[in-house]
């Protein structure tokens, strides 16, 4: 019997079969904890599964390129760098639309829910070690159709995130240079820089970028808050506890908050490159403590000093001089957060093409060239998207509505329900968790529907310039 989700047809011994000590070292009897929330563990008879067949990178004993090298801290910092960038720049404007109390409550509640759904993703990966991407998860849930559906959605989502970073890169250069040249040229520069940084094939080789990105976003926000506080010290801005607004404006603000927690789509890939995958909960806690705390503090403080006219992204809320300084400091996070998403997107295609072959672990011209080609194609496509939808908030809202609603919230409920099939009424705790995960699925659907409505209405009402324009796109963010 072949391992689940694997095309290899080699015979795998089953529980009870006689195997040698050498075989015991190669095969493992899977213990499936069907009730991670109950004190007892349930062992379900299932085939002994070849570890090499399960792992997306195969055996790395003699591999030239070893992927499973991340410590939990490195993994956590990659998750922070991937998540905490564009999202934090839009949160103060969400408070300006919703009011400070509803806005902060949403940031906190959605952060708690994102922590839980991230934990469920880790449970699903532990249950099905062969999963490297949402496409692999789709294969387990719905077969080949699910693999193609989830894979397509995942890839489109990554492309839109990459496009968001290219768009912000052009806004940054237009701000720093006072629109020194055509915006399209700035976009091309962004693509080339991002592609260069995406060339390393292992996540372990880009972890240093994660630390740089983290320092960059903190420094940029501190500079901006300090500048706005000094400039507005004589005339304090009005802070509204709640605020009346239209449905599409309110939900566009909500989708910006959701986008701030939209890193879950890459979690399977991060876990796959952990040296000890059982350490993933530590990485998740590091991410969620850091991002939720930063979001609450930055959103509240920036809104307090900048007021209802706070820009999105928030780095545009300072004076012209401080805008240039803030954007200059933010260059690393604008580039690196996009690079990490681009890396995971390229890795999905790379694994899909060469899984089970030696190409993944080789250092040949072909293996490196194919990686570079895949990355180049993805960044060119992202640039085209960035030029077609040159409105920052609307782009965030559209992406969140279509994809983040499911990858961050809705699908985790499906994963849990799938893993606990037939056990929903086993105990009162199990029934509560069943209700919670059904709720997560419904939340994903509601966010998707209302988010699509609000972002579509906002795009229709936008007066932004034409696509593929040389015009200065920083004016609407200053």
Image (cartoon, rainbow, N blue to C red):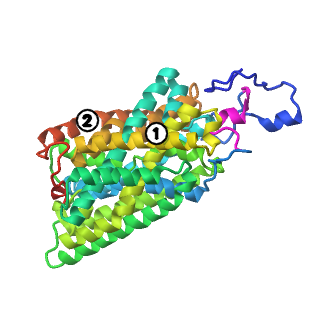
Of the image marks 2 and 1, the number of the one nearer the N terminus:
1
- Is residue 208 on the magenta stretch? no
Q: What residue is at 65 percent from the left and 48 percent from the top?
A: 66
Q: Between tags 2 and 1, which lies in front?
A: 1
SS of the residue at dot 2? helix
Quadrant of the image for the C terminus?
bottom left
Query: Residue 396: horizontal and vertical position, in percent?
Result: 29, 46
- Total of numbered circles in the picture? 2
- Is residue 51 on the magenta stretch? yes
Estimate how packed mark 1 is, as few (under 14), some (14 to 19) or many (20 or more) residues with alpha carbons within 10 Å.
some
* Horizontal relation, residue 126 to residue 84: left or right: right
Vertical relation: 423 (above or below) 281: above
Query: Residue 99: horizontal and vertical position, in percent?
Result: 22, 56
Q: What residue is at 22 percent from the left and 65 percent from the top?
A: 177
Is residue 313 visible in this depiction of the protein? no
Q: What residue is at 67 percent from the left and 38 percent from the top?
A: 58
Quadrant of the image for the N terminus?
top right
* Horizontal relation, residue 11 to residue 412: left or right: right
Q: Nearer the viewer, residue 305 or 134?
A: 134
- Please report the bounds of the magenta region as a residue range: 45-60
Residue located beneath label 1 in the image = 374
Which numbered dot is residue 155? Answer: none
Vertical relation: 380 (above or below) 331: above
Estimate how packed mark 2 is, as few (under 14), some (14 to 19) or many (20 or more) residues with alpha carbons within 10 Å.
many
Residue located beneath label 2 in the image = 452
Contact (CB < 8 A) between labels 2 and 1? no
Q: Which of 157 and 411 is in front in this view?
A: 157
* Horizontal relation, residue 439 to residue 269: left or right: left
């Amino acid at each position: 019997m072949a391992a689940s989700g694997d095309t290899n047809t080699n015979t795998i011994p089953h529980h009870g079969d006689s195997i040698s000590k050498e075989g015991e070292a190669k095969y493992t009897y899977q213990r499936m904890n069907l009730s991670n929330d109950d004190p007892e563990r349930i062992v379900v008879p299932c085939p002994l599964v070849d570890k090499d067949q399960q792992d997306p990178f195969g055996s790395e004993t003699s591999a030239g390129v070893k992927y499973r090298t991340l410590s939990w801290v490195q993994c956590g910092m990659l998750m922070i760098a991937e998540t905490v960038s564009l999202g934090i720049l839009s949160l103060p404007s969400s408070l300006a639309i919703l009011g400070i109390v509803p806005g902060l409550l949403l940031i906190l509640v959605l952060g708690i829910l994102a922590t839980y759904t991230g934990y469920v993703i880790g449970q699903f990966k532990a249950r099905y070690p062969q999963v490297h991407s949402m496409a692999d998860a789709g294969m387990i849930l719905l077969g080949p159709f699910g693999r193609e559906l989830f894979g397509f959605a995942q890839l489109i989502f990554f492309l839109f995130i990459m496009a968001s970073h290219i768009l912000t890169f052009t806004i940054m250069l237009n701000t720093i240079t006072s629109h020194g040249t055509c915006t399209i040229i700035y976009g091309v520069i962004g693509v080339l820089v991002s592609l260069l940084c995406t060339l390393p094939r292992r996540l372990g080789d880009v972890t240093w970028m994660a630390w740089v990105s983290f320092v960059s976003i903190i420094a940029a926000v501190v500079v901006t808050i300090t500048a706005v506080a000094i400039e507005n010290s004589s005339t304090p801005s009005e802070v509204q506890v709640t605020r009346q607004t239209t449905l599409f404006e309110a939900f566009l603000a909500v989708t910006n908050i959701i986008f701030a927690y939209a890193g879950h789509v890459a979690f399977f890939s991060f876990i796959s490159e952990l040296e000890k995958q059982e350490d993933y909960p530590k990485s998740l806690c590091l991410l969620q403590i850091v991002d939720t705390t930063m979001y609450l503090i930055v959103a509240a403080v920036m809104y307090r000093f900048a007021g209802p006219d706070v820009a999105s992204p928030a780095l545009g809320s300072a004076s012209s001089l401080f805008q240039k300084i803030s954007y200059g400091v933010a260059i690393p996070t604008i580039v690196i957060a996009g690079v990490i998403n681009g890396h995971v997107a390229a890795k999905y295609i790379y694994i899909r093409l060469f899984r089970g072959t030696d190409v993944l672990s080789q250092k040949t011209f072909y293996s490196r060239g194919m990686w570079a080609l895949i990355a180049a194609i993805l960044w060119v496509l992202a640039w085209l998207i960035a030029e077609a939808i040159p409105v920052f908030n609307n782009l965030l809202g559209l992406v969140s509505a279509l994809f983040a609603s499911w990858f961050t919230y809705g699908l985790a409920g499906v994963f849990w329900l799938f893993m606990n099939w037939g056990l929903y009424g086993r105990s009162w705790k199990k029934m509560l968790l069943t209700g919670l995960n059904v709720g997560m699925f419904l939340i994903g659907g509601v966010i998707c529907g209302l988010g699509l409505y609000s972002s579509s209405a906002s795009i229709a009402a936008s007066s932004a310039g034409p696509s593929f324009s040389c015009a200065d796109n920083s004016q609407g963010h200053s």
